[in-house]
Image: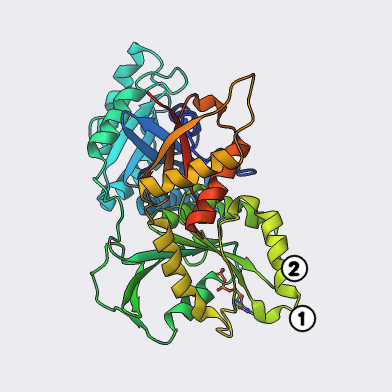
């Protein structure tokens, strides 16, 4: 999935443009509660492609001069995007800040699509000519307010979008560590890299993303995916929450398995749910890691008690194993790599069709779906259509009859039979032809 970032001065119409482009997010997972989409990122579908789109204007630093803010937004766009849409406005014409942004973008080497907004009528098109002065490609004229010209922009984005490999780290197990600030993400990454038998491959230029760290452990290759992002301007950028969400998303994209970290010294916090939602929605393998275990006063019941609380708070992550560790003392950190490896295997597991069908037939026999309006769901046969995440298609008499609770039941039966610990499972109903 390619990423588009929108940059431009305030008031050129970035959020109107953004809102025009993002459609209703189609989702096979309809059961994730409480994950609110941030207004700065969304998805746009165009022809057969889906892109992630970021409105960098929504990423703001408190109490910073305006120039620095734009600078940061452009930095983030350059860092995160595959294609940058540079939005200007024909109402105000070429402004000094536009020139500054254009210079910076040009240096980045990323594909830039120059879009002149607020071209609400044909006459205004003439005003767009002055933007040739920016020294970029031919400008595209749009009116975001009226929804004019957007298709051409999307065609151009598709044309210049670099081809991406489906999985950047073929043949390895890649994973990232996500969580609120201070849960111990970087401490855990360091602890893992210091494990006995971990050999960090220090060959410059061997990785696509210099920020990710490849290593081997027990003959198995792994890649730790970086979530920190640009540090150029000191610590400033990292502490901007919206930016850290973006970074988490792009790290999750490159990962097979996501370690979702909770700070055991504080317990579960509201913000953890947001992070957990990101992990779950991505459809990757998930391990819940309860860090700072050294700070927890415990007796023999503590672990069970905390586990119960985690299950209650993150119901939709019921498939994720829980690990209790201390990144500081390295206590139990050594269980993580084998677990990551196992979860990745589970994400890639393929079930033979005949075996799968036996399980689903049994499940139906033991507990047939309740009829709705006198109609009874019938699953004729099923098949696993993909992995990462394992996705099953049920061929049925009427897809509408597959209700959430029955889907859940089928999922549980599949899990009982085949395990799949750590990976979400997608189940889709199709009408049998
Ligand atoms: P990040 O913001 O999630 O990357 O968190 P850091 O790795 O920077 O850790 C934040 C703070 O928590 C630092 O002071 C760490 O030393 C501390 N910390 C991290 N892991 C542990 C742990 O397992 N136990 C204890 N007691 N402190 C930890």
Residue 259, image x and y in percent? 51, 64
Is 94 on the left-hand or right-hand side of 295? left
Question: Do the residues bearing badges 2 and 1 touch, measured as CB atoms within 8 Å?
Answer: no
Residue 56 pos. (x, y %): 46, 44
Quadrant in the picture for the N terminus: top left
Q: Quadrant of residue 4?
A: top left
- Does the numbered disc 1 mark a residue whose Cβ is under 8 Å from ligand 1? no
- Give coordinates of residue 159: x percent, y percent: 23, 35
Q: Residue 226, located in which quarter of the rendered image?
A: bottom left
The quarter of the rendered structure image containing the C terminus is top left
**Pointer 1: what residue?**
299
The quarter holding residue 267 reads bottom right
- As helix, strand or loop, the secondary structure at mark 1 comes to loop
Which residue position holds label 2?
A: 305
Q: Quadrant of ligand 1?
A: bottom right
Residue 256 vertical position relative to residue 124 in the rendered view, above or below: below
Residue shown at 38% from the left, 18% from the top: 148
User: Is 384 or 134 nearer to us in this picture?
Assistant: 384
Q: Is residue 46 left or right of residue 244?
A: left
Q: Which mark is residue 155?
A: none
Q: Secondary structure at mark 2?
A: helix
Drawn side of residue 266 relative to residue 9, left or right = right
**Relative to residue 222, is residue 248 depicted above or below?**
above
Q: Nearer the viewer, residue 351 or 121?
A: 351
């Amino acid at each position: 999935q390619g990423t588009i970032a929108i940059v431009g001065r305030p008031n050129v119409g970035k959020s109107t443009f953004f809102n025009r482009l993002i459609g209703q997010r189609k989702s096979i997972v309809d059961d994730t509660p409480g994950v609110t989409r941030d207004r700065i990122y969304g998805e746009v579908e165009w022809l057969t492609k889906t892109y992630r789109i970021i409105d960098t204007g929504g990423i703001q630093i408190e109490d910073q001069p305006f120039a620095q803010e734009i600078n940061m937004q452009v930095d983030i766009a350059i860092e995160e995007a595959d294609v940058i849409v540079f939005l200007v406005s024909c109402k105000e014409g070429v402004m000094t800040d536009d020139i500054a942004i254009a210079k910076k973008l040009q240096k980045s080497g990323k594909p830039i699509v120059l879009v002149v907004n607020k071209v609400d009528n044909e006459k205004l098109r003439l005003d767009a000519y002055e933007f040739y002065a920016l020294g970029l490609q031919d400008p595209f004229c749009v009116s975001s307010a009226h929804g004019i010209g957007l298709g051409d922009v999307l065609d151009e984005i598709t044309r210049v979008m670099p081809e991406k490999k489906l999985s950047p780290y073929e043949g390895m197990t890649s994973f990232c560590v996500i969580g609120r600030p201070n849960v111990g993400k970087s401490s855990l990454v360091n602890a893992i890299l210091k494990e006995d038998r971990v050999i960090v491959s220090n060959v410059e230029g061997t990785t696509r993303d210099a920020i990710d760290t490849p290593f081997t452990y027990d003959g198995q290759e792994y890649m730790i995916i970086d979530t920190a992002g640009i540090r150029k301007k000191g610590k400033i950028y990292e502490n901007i929450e919206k930016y850290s969400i973006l970074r988490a998303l792009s790290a999750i994209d490159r990962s097979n398995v996501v370690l979702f970290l909770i700070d055991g010294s504080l317990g579960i916090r509201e913000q953890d749910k947001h992070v957990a939602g990101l992990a779950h929605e991505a459809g990757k393998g998930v391990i819940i890691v309860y860090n700072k275990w050294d700070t927890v006063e415990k007796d023999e019941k503590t672990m069970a008690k905390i586990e119960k609380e985690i299950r209650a708070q993150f119901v939709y992550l019921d498939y994720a194993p829980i690990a209790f560790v201390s990144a500081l003392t390295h206590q139990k950190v050594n269980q993580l790599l084998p677990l990551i490896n196992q979860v990745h295997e589970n994400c890639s597991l393929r079930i033979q069709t005949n075996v799968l069908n036996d399980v689903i037939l049994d499940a139906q026999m033991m507990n047939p779906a309740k009829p709705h309006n006198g109609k009874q769901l019938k699953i004729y046969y099923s098949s696993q259509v993909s992995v990462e995440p394992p996705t099953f298609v049920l061929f049925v008499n009427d897809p509408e009859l597959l209700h959430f609770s029955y889907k859940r039941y089928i999922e549980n039966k599949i899990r009982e039979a085949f395990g799949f610990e750590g990976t979400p499972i997608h189940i889709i109903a199709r009408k049998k032809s």
